[in-house]
Image (cartoon, grey):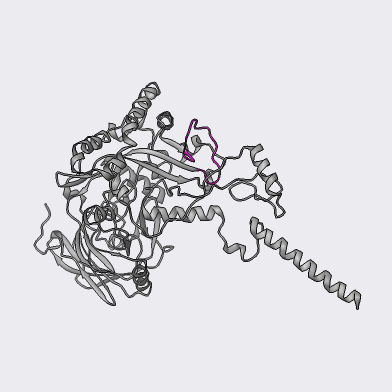
Amino acid sequence: MWLSRCGWLGVVVQWRLDLRLLSLAWTWGGCRGPMAETMPTRAEAAGGLSKTAQQNGDAGRDASLEPLPGGPVVELALGSGEQTPGGREQPSVLAPDPGKRKKRRGATRERIVPPPKKRRTGVSFSDEHFAETSYYFEGGLRKVRPYYFDFRTYCKGRWVGHSLMHVFSTEFRAQPLTYYEAAIRAGRLHLNEEPVQDLSIVLKDNDFLRNTVHRHEPPVTAEPVRLLAENEDVVVVDKPSSIPVHPCGRFRHNTVIFILGKEHQLKELHPLHRLDRLTSGVLMFAKTAVVSERIHEQVRDRQLEKEYVCRVEGEFPAKEVTCKEPILVVSYKVGVCRVDPQGKPCETVFQRLSYNGRSSVVRCRPLTGRTHQIRVHLQFLGHPILNDPIYNSVAWGPSRGRGGHIPKTDEELLRDLVAEHQAKQSLDVLDLCDGDMPPGLTDTTAPSSELAKDNLEELATAAQKMDGVVEAAPQDLDTMDLAQGKAAETEVINQETDPLCAECRLVRQDPLPQDLVMFLHALRYKGPDFEYVSPLPPWAQDDWQEN
């Protein structure tokens, strides 16, 4: 009996020890059981936060997050742990006591880096963002005054263990290395909020980068963003062509989100769908996350009806045409798709409304929601949108993609599309900056973007002098009153040119307002309990004639 009791006692003791070890394992991240698989690693969390910040638009195309108040993350050099994907050792289950850990950290002089912090998803922009710059109108165009902007990002996993020089030369090719050398001398490049001294510094997991740049935005049409409806749940607007829905590429203030915030004081909006930058028409925003989820559920359940109108080349068939060709994305970065058997299934119903002897107005009802679905299906049918800068381009070959016939590889197609738009200085049609392009598609050493080494010191010094004014600008613009109007105007003018900015040295010809219009318009959006319709654009009228 005594042995039996001792045996049970031993089992209980062993069970308690196992629980204690298991608790330590969860504490240090060493456990790899089924539950551990559901807990995101720090790298996964940073990746998810990066996507959230891009949706909020706080960082533009290169960046993702802002540092928020919080305790630092201490990297431990313990040894005998397992390697994480970022290459840093993970501490073993039986960790040393805090005193030894503190001593060892001091001995190795590990850098303390801030952890990623969650942002409020779905929230728009603050008054500080809106005060970065201002609009002005000229020649039928809405323009943004050049301004200073901080690109912010945490170190991506593929950058860990590489130098800043390597990252800039491989992933940020829009500028030569001499630019970044000058930016360092001007104090515009920061790592964990400390000025970078040398491009040879090696990046570590969770390092936080901030790069201050002089930003220029392309002009868009001066047509206003008109409100079609507003209630406690939604905001519905008639979006003009050429204006992106949210910040992307080179666009930030010249976007529907910013214009609504700055001119209509409509903030914290949730986009319910998106329209291509060159597409006009009905655009819906939810005012709350609850309404957003409800309408997105209706979209998933196919309860939302969408109707577009467009003007296409030639005489479209009089009878209703249904196209079910699958669509494949050729390049997410360049934003080009084509019909391909390996693509995703989709379906569009077309009905001709009028024909003027040269072109047809066609009603389009997409039953699925693939990227560029209407434009790609019309190209396949041999009736591309009359002025579609991508799918009615000679880059697709003599037949311009009719019937899916494209006599070139995807790489050749992308190269030819980019070359065509570069020649027209209309790269913004592809919603790209040079740094976005895949390697080999563009010459990134153009003389206009070069900074001569003999001028490096002079340019950096001039930039340092200007930064004394720039650093105070956001606060001044945010708090200025009428009595400070003249001083604020001078401050904005001081931001319009920058010694290090390659864009300041370029002379770009403004597009004509009519060049910013593509003949595709979202006419109607209908759900179970709502229906919104926008007016027909002039080019969709029966008596409209091409110039």
Was residue 195 drawn as part of the magenta stretch in this picture? yes
Q: Give the percent coordinates (x, y) of residue 289.
A: 37, 66
19 lies left or right of 64: right
Give the magenta part as a residue range: 191-207
Kindly indicate the quadrant of the structure image that contains residue 456: top left
- Total numbered labels: 0
60 lies left or right of 72: left
Residue at coordinates 29% horizontally, 77% vertically from top-left? 528
73 lies left or right of 409: right
The answer to whether residue 325 is above or below residue 256 is below
Q: Give the percent coordinates (x, y) of residue 34.
A: 63, 66
Foreground pick, 424 / 402: 424
Is residue 409 visible in this depiction of the protein?
Answer: no
Residue that protrudes farthest toward the top in the picture: 454
Was residue 313 drawn as part of the magenta stretch in this picture? no
Q: Mainly helix, strand or loop, the magenta region?
A: loop
Kindly indicate the quadrant of the structure image that contains residue 190: top left
Q: Give the percent coordinates (x, y) of residue 404.
A: 34, 59
Residue that protrudes farthest toward the left in the picture: 543
The answer to whether residue 145 is above or below residue 20 is above
Specify the quadrant that holds the N terminus. Answer: bottom right
The answer to whether residue 262 is above or below residue 502 is below
Foreground pick, 62 / 261: 261
Residue at coordinates 12% horizontally, 61% vertically from top-left? 357
Q: Give the percent coordinates (x, y) of residue 272.
A: 32, 65
Is residue 412 visible in this depiction of the protein?
Answer: yes
